[in-house]
Amino acid sequence: MQNSQDENSEVRPELRRDITLVDAVGIGLGAIIGAGIFVVTGVAAGVAGPAFLIGLLIAGMAAACNALSSAELAATYPQSGGTYEYGYRLLSPSAGFAAGWMFLASKLAAGGTVALGFGAYLSKLVPSVPAKYAAVGGVLVLTAANLFGIKKAGKLNTAIVAVTLLTLVVFAAVGIPSFDTANLTPFAPFGILGIAESSALMFFAYTGYARIATLGEEVHEPKKTIPRAIVITIIVSIMLYAAVAIVAVGSIGAPGLAATSSPLQEASRSFAFPGVVWVVGIGATTAMFGVLLSQIVGISRMMFAMARRRDLPDFLGHVSNKHAVPAIGIILTGGVILVLAVFGTLEFVISAASFTILIYYGIANICALRLAKKDKIYPKWISATGLIFCSALAISLPWIVVGTGLATLAVGFMFRMILRSIPGSSAPTS
């Protein structure tokens, strides 16, 4: 464990820089390639028809703008916490807290959902293993893995991501002979509105690249590694999503994809190689496992960053001496996800996840616009475009989702106020 002095001359615990470029790219891909490609593809096809392919590209452009904003911010401020840290430094403590709290609320709820998804997919592959038992086992294994240091967790994540990528490449390659242009007509049965809705859906399939920025304090040579890792991650994701989506819709058409909760498995049934169905099942299982690992890593680091500024209880800022990880935060994260996996997820938070993540990335883009000229890596129009995308997508969401998201934020500020009213818990001014 390392220590540093903050502006108030306090000793602040720091994490060890053990993440290489390969590990960082693996963490980014592990956070992105999950439910999006295996589930949301079918939902997007249902609202836009084959034209969801255009929505996929639009979403990729929006994600790329947000990713580049996150990249230059992380290169300038390579600390744990991502947008939480940038909001504090470049906007205000309230903006930083809003970003951090929304991240925690959405990712914790999503963690429970991902754990259940992993259990369901594994149960399909191994019917003798009940889905809920598999979910619990997965959470326990990954929580334990995280306690042994980010280097070991990173290597495990890289191996998981490699399996997932391989299965998707096999799907795309084997599915080419099944492609039929007739399945692309009518191309846009629901018009521009359908394409817009599909782009909003597919945007959330890309979110996860900022996980690299959240781990900024543990990356080797962050000013070089983080921007490179984020750019590589988003390019690979866009190319892979496009290839898989084109093959899938060309194989069974948009109605076929929309009629099932497992669109890629359904598409693979039309391939000449029946074994691909099992390959896709393995890929879906490892994808969920990788996302779950990424969730535990990212949430625990956000807790660590917020505790260090006393926006969360101090004990969450503890760093273990042996492995230099926020052990208490990891255990708490695993525990909350475990409870959600056993007793069911917080539906009201999940419904607001789309809104909360847009707030998070919106704040990131505003922070990028506020960066000093010497710290800018990319033109300002990229961050401005990312902010416009986030605003437009947020406006398009149902009011009940927006209301739930704002209520979640209000609860966070109330918790913060109560925490800071406790004697001896005043926050640093930095």
Image (spheres, rainbow, N blue to C red):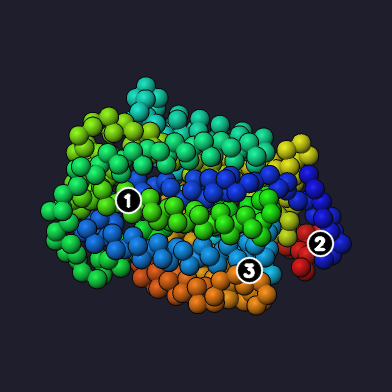
| Quadrant of residue 268 within the rendered picture | top left
Q: What element carries label 1?
A: helix
Q: Which mark is residue 6?
A: 2
Q: What element carries label 3?
A: helix
Say if residue 245 shows up in the picture.
Answer: yes
Q: How dense is the environment of label 1, judged by Cα within 10 Å: few (below 14), some, or many (20 and up)?
A: some
- Kindly identify the residue that appears in the image at 30 percent across and 44 percent down: 172
- Kindly identify the residue that appears in the image at 20 percent across and 53 percent down: 254
Q: Quadrant of the N terminus?
A: top right
Q: Tag 2 or tag 3, which sits nearer the N-term?
A: 2
**Where in the figure is residue 29, as x and y percent of width and height?**
48, 48
**Where in the figure is residue 80, as x and y percent of width and height?**
67, 55
**Dot 2 and dot 1 residues touching (CB under 8 Å):** no
Q: Residue 243 carries which label?
A: 1
Q: Quadrant of the C terminus?
A: bottom right
**Where in the figure is residue 81, as x and y percent of width and height?**
64, 57
Tell us which disc is closer to us: 1 or 3.
Answer: 1
